[in-house]
Amino acid sequence: QSTAYTAALTDYGKSIDTTAGVTIPANATIAFPVGTVLMITNISASAITVTQAAGVTLRMAGTTLTGNRTLAAYGVCSARKVATDTWMISGSGLT
């Protein structure tokens, strides 16, 4: 992806290789099954943002932090859906 992108059901089991931001959609928009893992790979030399859509909680694994996350240049992260609109995210280069 080279422009802002919203994760789709077809991304399940693949890596979203991107140079632009990625949005994790609300369940009402795209109903990923609980347990879905999305991998996001930033293939650019600039940081990108992983954005939580309205109604979504994106929690950084191992912390109490929620909200949009920054993925550093050439960083890789994964987001796992743990409840209807709750995702856990972790990875290399993620803040």
Image (tube, rainbow, N blue to C red):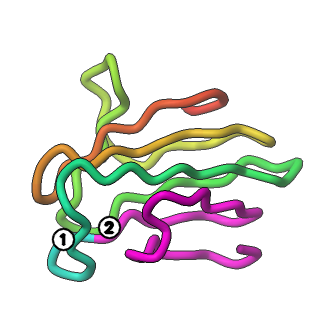
Q: Which residues are magenta?
A: 1-25
Report the disc number at residue 53.
Answer: 2
The residue positioned 38% from the left and 75% from the top of the image is 9
Mark 1 neighbour density, 10 Å: few (under 14) some (14–19) many (20 or more): some
Q: Position of residue 76 (x, y in %)?
A: 65, 39
Residue 4, magenta (yes or no): yes
- First in residue order: circle 1 vs circle 2: 1
Q: Crowdedness of circle 2 by 10 Å Cα count: few (<14), some, many (20+)? A: some
Disc number for residue 77: none
Q: Position of residue 70 (x, y in %)?
A: 58, 43
**Amino acid on which disc 1 is placed:** Asn
The secondary element bearing badge 2 is classed as loop
Tell me residue 24's x, y (percent): 38, 63
The extreme top residue here reads 62
Image quadrant in which you'd find residue 33:
bottom left
Q: Position of residue 39 (x, y in %)?
A: 53, 49
C-alpha span from label 1 to label 2: 10 Å
Q: Residue at x 46, y 31 (%)?
A: 90
Residue that carries the numbered disc 1 in the rendered image: 27
Closer mark to the observer between disc 1 and disc 2: 1
Instruction: Report the residue at 29% width, 37% height from top.
Output: 59
Q: Measured along the vertical axis of the image, is residue 14 above or below residue 2?
A: above
